[in-house]
Image: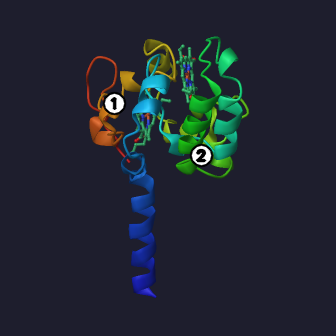
Amino acid sequence: MKWFTAFILVFASTMAHADGGRLSVPANPQWKTECGSCHIAYPPQLLTGENWQRLMGGLDKHFGANAALDAKENKEILEFLQHYAGSGDKRSAASLRISDTPWFTREHRKVSNKIWTEVKSRSNCTACHVNAERGDWSERGIRMPGGQRWDDDD
Ligand code: HEC
Ligand code: HEC
């Protein structure tokens, strides 16, 4: 029975800490340019394919901005997003915001309200994930407002 317990422990800790490493996607200049000009191009894995489809269907009214694309570009980017999309209820939100998904809330549960106010918006990922433009979302690459490292005392 011992080997089984050991396996579960290793597996569980990998699951808890590997999120940052699983968010890479092949280079896609079109997506980077069109979806990374107003904010970082958010990783496709963090919303479901169904959420991406609805989001891409309403780009003319995109969280108060107009991000409309022509039909061809819209289709190509949607296909890319859906190919790498996440799945399940924890990657889905009625608001179509990654920052409202159960996954996000749980992952960020130790971030205080004071800190959220300092970075102004939860959507402002790069305020803390300073290497995210390079595809690095790992805990090592997190700096809190003021510059200090994130100290996870679990
Ligand atoms: C206020 C700073 C802050 C903002 C803004 C923020 N995060 Fe985080 N994020 C953190 C912290 C701190 C952790 C680590 C939490 C822990 O270990 O308890 C984290 C963890 C993560 C992880 C898991 C990293 C790993 O390897 O375990 C991912 C992925 C992530 N955030 C994505 C995002 C995305 C996407 C956004 C924007 C939509 C975002 N974050 C916005 C502070 C932030
Ligand atoms: C014209 C500027 C603009 C462009 C271009 C743009 N967005 Fe946005 N996007 C916004 C704004 C503004 C918000 C809301 C930010 C906030 O609440 O702080 C937003 C928010 C989002 C969110 C929710 C972030 C969260 O809180 O989890 C997603 C997902 C998103 N955009 C995806 C995309 C995708 C995909 C594209 C490319 C097709 C795109 N955006 C292009 C302006 C833009």
- Quick check: is the Cβ at mark 2 less than 8 Å away from ligand 2? no
The coloring applied to the image is rainbow
Question: Quarter for ligand 2?
Answer: top right
Measured as percent of width and height from the top left, residue 153 is found at 34, 43
Foreground of the two, 85 or 123: 85
Foreground of the two, 20 or 41: 41
Look at mark 1 in the image and give the residue it sits on.
Answer: 133
1 and 2 marks in contact (CB < 8 Å): no
**Element under disc 1:** helix
Foreground of the two, 26 or 62: 26
Whether residue 83 appears in this view of the structure is: yes
Q: Is residue 105 left or right of residue 40?
A: right
Residue sitting farthest toward the front: 72
Which residue is depicted at the point 64% across and 37% down? 52
- Quick check: is the Cβ at mark 1 less than 8 Å away from ligand 1? no
Mark with earlier residue (1, 2) = 2
Mark 1 burial class by Cα count in 10 Å: few <14, some 14-19, many 20+: some
Whether residue 97 appears in this view of the structure is: no
Which residue is depicted at the point 58% across and 43% down? 79
In the picture, the disc for residue 82 is 2
What amino acid is found at the position of numbered circle 1 in the picture? Glu
Q: Determine the CA span between mark 1 and mark 2.
A: 21 Å
In the picture shown, does residue 121 fall above or below 9?
above
Measured as percent of width and height from the top left, residue 64 is found at 65, 11
Which residue is depicted at the point 66% across and 52% down? 88
